[in-house]
Every structure is written in structure tokens, then in C-alpha cells.
Amino acid sequence: DLEFTQNLSDFFSFTGINSGVYDPRILFDVEHRRFIVISLHGTTPSTTKILVAFSKYEDPSAGWYYYSFDGNPLGDDHWFDYPNVGLTDNNLFFTGLMRDDNLLWQYSVIYQVDKRLCFEGKQTNWSYYSDVNNADGEKAFNLVPTHTAWNNYPDSKMYFISNVANGGDQYHLHSIDGNVGSELPIIAYQITGPQT
């Protein structure tokens, strides 16, 4: 049965943005019994935003808490695109590709957000990782969080998989272990697999 429907731009109008919203991702947090919606706004370094909404209850029609994250926190000439999302018990992770004005990928990023505070509508803590390299020293491409599909999330450790921008048989596994608020190392591994 359909529980909730709303135009994407109208849904995020509480953030002050009511047009140009795209690339939605929707998760249901099975531990907290809440929905999380992530979408993007802007395709320039000065307009790029990541919009995130957390449902107040299991019923998505019963209200939401809204957050907006700068898609260019380094203030360079890049904007955030192609989001991927994952959850641990305490954190929401979303990753993306940073593009230049010619739409070319330059580097990849990871955001780590304390989701517990967001489920309560409080000011959140978050971290941002922009210097993400593979085990071979090359820049990581298209990082995808790999949270579990079961009913229990890991406490704090998140794994990310990625391939190589131009294809090939090299795959990469990264991990972050810890919660927001500390400088966490990103561990990288390289795996040889089928040609893409």
C-alpha cells in the first residue's frame, strides 16, 4: 500500500530549496525504524548541496527533520555528484564524485554523519574525507558503502568498494572504523577480479 507521496522539490522546500532537486536515494533504517532520504541540488561549486531528511517516526507521513550539507566544503572549483549511501548503527555515510565545470571527475569524497542526533532533530556532527586513495596510491573512484542487509548494523565500521574509473580488473576495498568526531584513518586494500 502507498503510505506517502510528495513531489521531490516540495518535499525538500523546508531547506529553503524548492527547485532543481535530483538524484534521490531512500533508505529504511531497520534498527531505528525510520526513513532517510538523500537528494542533491546544484551543479556548480557555488550551488552544490546534499539535502538529507530523517523521518520522525516509522510512518513517513508523520513529519521529517531536514538537513543541508555543503557539497563543496573545501571551497574549490568542484561540485558533488552521484551519491551512494550506507548505514552503521551510529552513522550515515554518503559518498560522491567531485566534478569540475566540464563535468569531469576529479576526486571522490565520503561524508560521515551522526544519524542518532538527526533522528532527534538536533544539530548534527559530521566529518568529511576528501583525500581518499586506493592501496596503489591512485585516487579512489566511485566509492560505494556496503552496509549489511540484515536487521543489525555494525557499530561503527563501514566498508566501501570501488572500481577503476576507466575499467579494468582492479577493485578496491576501503574501511573506516569509528564514530564522528575523531580523525579516523581510511584503510585501503586492492583486489584483482573480472575485467570490466
Image: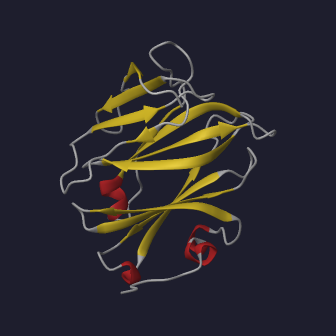
- Left or right, 128 with reference to 157: right
Going 30% across and 75% down the picture, which residue do you hit? 57
Q: Looking at the image, can residue 9 be seen?
A: yes
- Residue found at the very far front of the displayed protein: 194
- Residue found at the very far right of the displayed protein: 102
- Left or right, 152 with reference to 57: left
Color theme of the render: secondary structure
> Residue 170, relative to residue 177: is it above or below?
above
> Residue 72, relative to residue 16: is it above or below?
above
The percent position of residue 62, horizontal first and vertical second, equals 37, 83
Quarter that holds the N terminus: bottom left
Tally the numbered discs: 0
Q: Looking at the image, can residue 127 be seen?
A: no
Quarter assignment of residue 16? bottom right
Quarter that holds the C terminus: top right
- Residue found at the very far left of the displayed protein: 152
Going 59% across and 79% down the picture, which residue do you hit? 7
Is 101 in front, or is 73?
101
The percent position of residue 29, horizontal first and vertical second, equals 30, 61
The percent position of residue 27, horizontal first and vertical second, equals 38, 61
Going 44% across and 50% down the picture, which residue do you hit? 85
Going 21% across and 54% down the picture, which residue do you hit? 150
The percent position of residue 125, horizontal first and vertical second, equals 40, 46
- Left or right, 39 with reference to 160: right
